[in-house]
Image: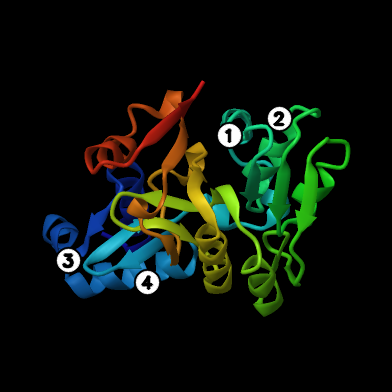
Amino acid sequence: MLAASRKELLLDRLRTEGRIVAKDIATELGVSEDSIRRDLRELDAAGLAVRVYGGALPASPAVVNYAARQTVATESKQRIGQYAARLIEPGSTVLIDGGTTALEMVRALPLDTECTIITHSPTVAAALLDHAAEVIILGGRLFKHSAVASGAATAEAAAAISADRFFLGVTGIHEHSGLTTGDPDEAAMKRVLASRASETYVLGSSEKIGAVSRYQVLPLDGVAAVIVESADTASPTLSALAGIGVRLLHAR
C-alpha cells in the first residue's frame, strides 16, 4: 500500500475509532511499525493527528485561527453558550475564558443580569458593553490566535481575584488525554484562571469532543462538569467520560 493510501486509511480510523495503535495497524496492513510511525509523524506535522505513546489520537479542528474558528460548529457553540449563560446567577462573580464559544455565551446572557464578569478576552468584554453586568478585564500581552491577554502581567492580575465559577474553553476533550489546547502559555493561563474559581465548567462544543491538542490544561477530575450537546449522547467519547465519572451537563 502506498504511503498516501495508508495515511487516508489512518485518518479514517481516527475518525471512526478515535485512536490508532501503531503496532496493531502495522500488523493489519503487513508493513513495519517504522512505516506507520513515519506516517503518524507526518500527519502530526500537518495538524491532522496528535502522536501519543504507541500511536495517535484525533487532532482538534479548534486549533485554527480565531477567524476560522467562528465558522466551526456554530450551532453547537450557540447551544452550549445558551446553556452556560443560564448558569450565571444574579449577584455572582464569574470568570469567562476567551474563544468563540465563550462569545456565544455572553451574547446569550440577558442584558439585565446583575453580576460581575472577569475576563482576559477583549472580544468577550466588548460583547458585554450593553449589559448590566460589571466587567473587569485582565490585561497583558495579546495572544492574537485566541484573542486573549496572556503572559506574566495577566497571571499576576488573575492572582488578585476570585470567582464563583470559571467557564473554560479548550480545543480538545478526550477520556485519556483530558482537557487540552494548542499552546503551552495559553494552557498555563487557563490553569491560573481555574485556580481562582470555586468551580470550573468546560464549554464542550461538538468539534472538541474526542479530539486532542498538544498541551494539557487540566485533568478531567479537575472540573465540576463538562457542558455538551444533547445531540452528542451517542458519542463514544461521552460514554467513556460518563463511565469514568465525569459530570456531563446536556445543553438542550
Left-right relation of 170 to 233: right
The reply to whether callout 2 and callout 4 are in contact (CB within 8 Å) is: no
In the displayed structure, 42 sits above or below 68; it is: below
Residue farthest toward the right in the current orientation of the protein: 130
Query: Which of 57 and 6 lies nearest the eye of the viewer?
Result: 57
Within 10 Å of disc 4 (Cα), the crowding (few <14, some 14-19, many 20+) is some
Residue labelled with disc 2: 108
Looking at marks 3 and 2 on the same chain, the residue that comes earlier in the sequence is marked by 3
Q: Residue at x 42, y 67 (%)?
A: 44
| Circle 4 SS class | helix
In the displayed structure, 28 sits above or below 79; it is: below
Tell me the distance, in whole angstroms, between the alpha carbons under discs 2 and 4: 41 Å
Tell me the distance, in whole angstroms, between the alpha carbons under discs 3 and 2: 52 Å
Tell me the distance, in whole angstroms, between the alpha carbons under discs 1 and 3: 48 Å
Within 10 Å of disc 1 (Cα), the crowding (few <14, some 14-19, many 20+) is many
The reply to whether callout 3 and callout 2 are in contact (CB within 8 Å) is: no
* Front label number (4 vs 1): 1
Tell me if residue 196 can be seen: yes
The reply to whether callout 2 and callout 1 are in contact (CB within 8 Å) is: yes
Within 10 Å of disc 3 (Cα), the crowding (few <14, some 14-19, many 20+) is few
Residue labelled with disc 4: 41
Residue labelled with disc 1: 84
Which quarter of the figure has residue 215? Answer: bottom left
Amino acid type of disc 2?
Ala
Which quarter of the figure has residue 186? Answer: bottom right
| Circle 1 SS class | helix
Q: Position of residue 232 (x, y in %)?
A: 41, 29
Q: Position of residue 172 (x, y in %)?
A: 45, 52
